[in-house]
Amino acid sequence: MDDAFQAAEHSLRGFDGLPMPFERARTLFVKGQIHRRRRQKRLAREALHEALAVFEDLGTPGWAERARAELARIPGRRGATGLTPTEETIARMAASGLSNREIADRTFLSPKTVEVNLTRVYRKLGVRSRAALGGRFAAEQSAGET
């Protein structure tokens, strides 16, 4: 990991002053992944948010989605539901009717990882099905609108 980090840093310095924002953003994306794997959450978020902003500005939705998925994999504060960001993302996708395979494809996770996360979501929220999960999120949304 140390060598990978040094290579990413070297690469970023190489982009200084060059009109190559996409390549720089991809390098930031890799740097964010390295920080995440080293459990350096704040640094990972900073690099990935910067990469995401560039991907969005350049109109590269595939890369922007990959950056969002990577950000969702960083353990963080639990939301109002008590779910991690990854669990929240997966739960909302499942509640919207996507299959585990479709969720896996969109979040760049394995179907098994999606299944494990959904199991934790069901336990934490006290639900037993996708329909109940959808009802739970619909109830939250209508409560927030009133």
Image (tube, rainbow, N blue to C red):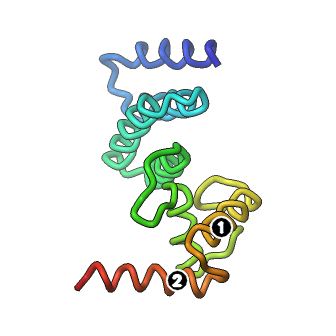
Q: Is residue 80 left or right of residue 96?
A: left
Q: In which quarter of the image is the C terminus?
A: bottom left
Residue 12: x %, y % from top left: 43, 19
Quarter in which the N terminus is drawn: top right
Identify the residue under disc 1: 118
Task: Establish if 135 lies above or below 89.
Answer: below
Place residue 102 in its image quadrant: bottom right
Instruction: Using residue 77 as the reference point, say whether residue 116 is left or right of it.
Output: right
Please give the name of the residue rendered at 31% of the width and 83% of the height, measured from the top-left corner. Answer: 143
How far across and down, in percent of the image, does residue 49 sit? 38, 40
The picture quadrant where one finds residue 3 is top right
Find the distance from the CA under tag 2 to the CA under tag 1: 13 Å
Q: Which residue is drawn at 39% across and 64% down?
A: 80
Asked whether disc 2 touches disc 1, contact meaning CB atoms under 8 Å apart, the reply is: no
Identify the amino acid type marked 2.
Answer: Gly
Number of the label disc, if any, that sits on residue 134:
2
Q: Which residue lies furthest to the right in this view?
A: 112
> Looking at the picture, how far across and down is residue 129, in whole percent?
66, 83
- Height in image: 106 above or below 126? above
